[in-house]
Image (tube, helix red, strand yellow):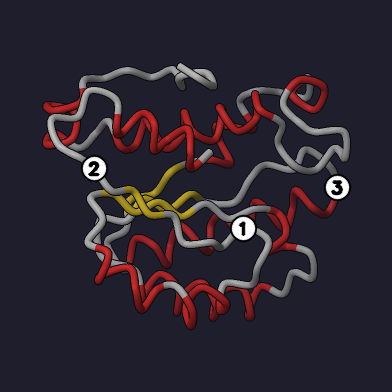
Amino acid sequence: AARCTARRVSVGARRRRRLVEPPVAGAPARTPRGTVLPHVRQWRPDVITVGIGGDCLRSYDPARFSADFGELTAALPAGTCMADVPYFMHGRWEGHADQAAGILTATARVHQLRIVPLHDALSDRGAGAMLTDFAADWFHPNDRGHRVWADAFWIELSRSPALTAELGRGRSCPQRGG
């Protein structure tokens, strides 16, 4: 999803744009805080996006999740686009994802981050999305699923007057090689 979003940001730009997505997916929130985040400001990105995946909910503990993401959101510059938690469609995982999305949204707002409602974007796709938007492991997004993530980020990014004045309002992700 980050590559797709980066292509959208770069298409039609009058100058080179730098998009940074600290690696949070698949790792605890505290991992990028100590390794990547100290460098983010040095890189001087035009856009910072953060999208977490379900791996952050593997051993979900609301208090730990809140503490970890409270620290992570505090370390990010204001204006960073941060997705809430993906929609899981089934059982306790969805209950945890829904609760975690609320926690993450609340902590991100405190630190003036821009919320990308990924949970709603995936939920709106319906149960059929399990067949069309997920990889064979029924957990990770496939190419179409990554475009749904990128669309969610693009909708939030397109609300930035400075960025859209330069780039236009294109919403579809350029296909590979295009």
Who's the residue at 44% across and 55% down the image?
21
Q: Give the mark nearest the N terminus, 2 or 3.
A: 2
Q: Name the residue under label 3.
A: 91
Alpha carbons under labels 2 and 1: distance apart: 23 Å
Q: Which of the numbered marks, if any, corresponds to residue 17?
A: 2
Q: 10 Å neighbourhood of mark 2: few (<14), some, or many (≥20)? A: some
Who's the residue at 22% across and 61% down the image?
44
Whether residue 38 sits left or right of residue 178 in the image: it is left
Q: Relative to the observer, which residue lies in front, 39 or 117? A: 39
Who's the residue at 46% across and 62% down the image?
22
Alpha carbons under labels 2 and 3: distance apart: 41 Å
Q: Which amino acid does label 2 sit on?
A: Arg
Q: What residue type is labelled 1?
A: Ala
Q: Relative to the observer, which residue lies in front, 4 or 120? A: 4
Whether residue 1 sits left or right of residue 10 in the image: it is right
* Above or below 39: residue 98: above
Q: Give the mark nearest the N terminus, 2 or 1.
A: 2
Question: In the structure shown, which secondary structural element does the residue marked by tag 2 occupy?
Answer: loop
Q: Where is residue 170 in the image (x, y as percent from the top left)?
A: 32, 17
Alpha carbons under labels 3 and 1: distance apart: 21 Å
In terms of image quadrants, where is residue 78? bottom left
Q: What residue type is labelled 3?
A: Gly
Q: Mark 1 points at which residue?
A: 25
Identify the image quadrant of the C terminus.
top left
* Above or below 152: residue 129: above
Q: Which of the numbered marks, if any, corresponds to residue 124?
A: none
Q: Give the mark nearest the N terminus, 3 or 1.
A: 1
